[in-house]
Image (cartoon, rainbow, N blue to C red):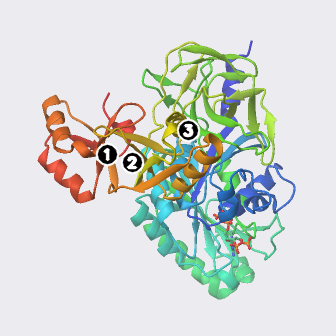
Amino acid sequence: MFSESALKQQVERRRTFAIISHPDAGKTTITEKILLYGGAIQMAGTVKARKSKKFATSDWMEIEKQRGISVTSSVMKFSYNDFEINLLDTPGHQDFSEDTYRVLTAVDSALMLIDGAKGVEAQTKKLLEVCRMRNTPVITFMNKFDRECINPFDLLDEVESVLKIKCSPLTWPIGMGRDFKGVYDLSEKCIRIYHDNEKRHEFDTIALEDLNDVKLDDLVGNDYADQLREDMELLEGAGTPFTVEDYISGEVTPVFFGSALRNFGVYEFLHRFLEFAPKPQSRQAQERIVAPDESKLTGFIFKIQANMDPSHRDRIAFMRICSGKFSRGMKMYHCRLDRMIKMNSTVTFMAKERETLDEGYAGDILGLYDPGLYKIGDSFSQGEQLNFKGIPNFSPENFMKVRLADPLKGKQLEKGLIQLTEEGATQVFRLVASNDHVLGVVGVLQFEVIKFRLLHEYSVEGVFEAVPYTTARWYHCQDEGTVKKFEERYIAQVATDVKEKKIFLCNSTWDLDYAKKKFEGLEFYQNSDHIPV
Ligand code: G4P
């Protein structure tokens, strides 16, 4: 029997996080450096190579190869010192943000990577909003300081004003670009000297008595030493002091400066991250809160990915373990299907390969081979009825009607659309008035993916037609009369989602505002999770 304290210890050791950034900020580069420290990869360039056409892990689809982007995200697990780290990768391309959003529901914290030359960019803003919905703690890494960047104070100001999160720098850059000298570590009161050498994993750390220490002038020169003194004075007066509590509650983000490419600052980040990033947290289910060190195994599916391995053409469901201990071969209760399922074919994901997972604890991610049993949001337990919350559908921003080129293939189309919806590749709505299928996605590139997959996996040629909708909202009102009147007025724009929840497909934001004004008491929701039950 596994003791309670042994289980607690396993939970303590785990850190499950994702990196959020705008494409090109350096996510692949920093992932690679982090994995190098963990020994999960031996060679720089491994992760980078995956991005290339030749090695893309998810190169199952021509679209990915043609565009050179990674459509789907993966999970990387590795050990470092005494920690078990699960790094959940998120697709970099902005068109695939829905998948990224869902990955964020399965992590306990996030690393926000910002290109120091560009500041806060659109994708980062969207992703941080998702983190804020769940109060996910966020650490910030200001990248590319080996290049000319925005003034660090302006960068912090931008994060604070645009992202509405307070910044507390834990390191501070000395110079930048060609004159990048290194960083000052505010808590350890030392200087880390930058060497322009990509392969270095070590750096010179020089302790200072205080900022007036002449060593500082010798190391970085008088001008930079004075600048640092001035910056620190300013920070002391106007900066936000760091406390772990404020970070855990999602109110403050600790900030590091460095260069992922030159592997400078990544080591400090990783160490401080392990020191204060949260271990697996309790999770809210509809029925109750589930603590990570409860003895019974629970979890939920946050992602389904098809054809990860082109030679297998398989589907894998990703389950985040929320509590208990997983052992291979054990049975779990599939709460939606109300039946026990034997967990035989499970995998975990190392940086490069799949390995069989024999044991797992809260925070770990299980990959389950899916014969068609799983849907995003499914909850599992050891017999108890549980429904984990917080795996919402996001309101799509692009719509297309899908029709069959060959009308005899209706069944295949239905099957294909259901499976693609279960995987979260698209949302499918059925117009109440006409019964037509309308696909809704967050990014337009998803349409191409769906068209391609319908044709290659289900032998269905879908004809996609433009529709006038620009946004969608789930709606709810206590008063059934109001709902009825609303639906009569907007008969051509009312649809149902796969869970039979009603959704309003609006032609413009003006349309939506008008409906809001006209039908008092009717509430509109961007996120299906927020509709009252
Ligand atoms: P992504 O996954 O977030 O999309 O970004 P990725 O790591 O692929 O990095 C995007 C570009 O930024 C790459 O250059 C990468 O080398 C560069 N980069 C990442 N971190 C740093 C850094 O700290 N300093 C500098 N100077 N550059 C950085 P590229 O030219 O697009 O690709 P490559 O030819 O270098 O492979």
Residue 465 appears in the picture as rendered: yes
Q: Which residue is mark 3?
A: 416
Residue 467 position (above or below residue 158):
above
Mark 2 is surrounded, within 10 Å at the Cα level, by few (under 14), some (14 to 19) or many (20 or more) other residues, namely many
Seen at 79% across and 61% down, the residue is: 49
Seen at 40% across and 55% down, the residue is: 397
Q: Which mark is residue 395?
A: 2
Contact? badges 3 and 1 (CB < 8 Å): no
Marks 3 and 1: which is nearer the front? Answer: 3
Residue 237 appears in the picture as rendered: no
Q: Position of residue 320 (x, y in %)?
A: 61, 33
Contact? badges 3 and 2 (CB < 8 Å): no
Residue type at the position of mark 1: Arg
Q: Which residue is mark 1?
A: 473
Q: Which mark is residue 103?
A: none
On the picture, is 160 further left or further right than 54? left
Residue type at the position of mark 3: Gly
Image-quarter location of ligand 1 = bottom right
Seen at 50% across and 61% down, the residue is: 123
Nearest the camera: 6 or 481?
481
Residue 486 position (above or below residue 124):
above
Contact? badges 1 and 2 (CB < 8 Å): yes
Quadrant position of the N terminus in the picture: top right
Nearest the camera: 129 or 227?
129
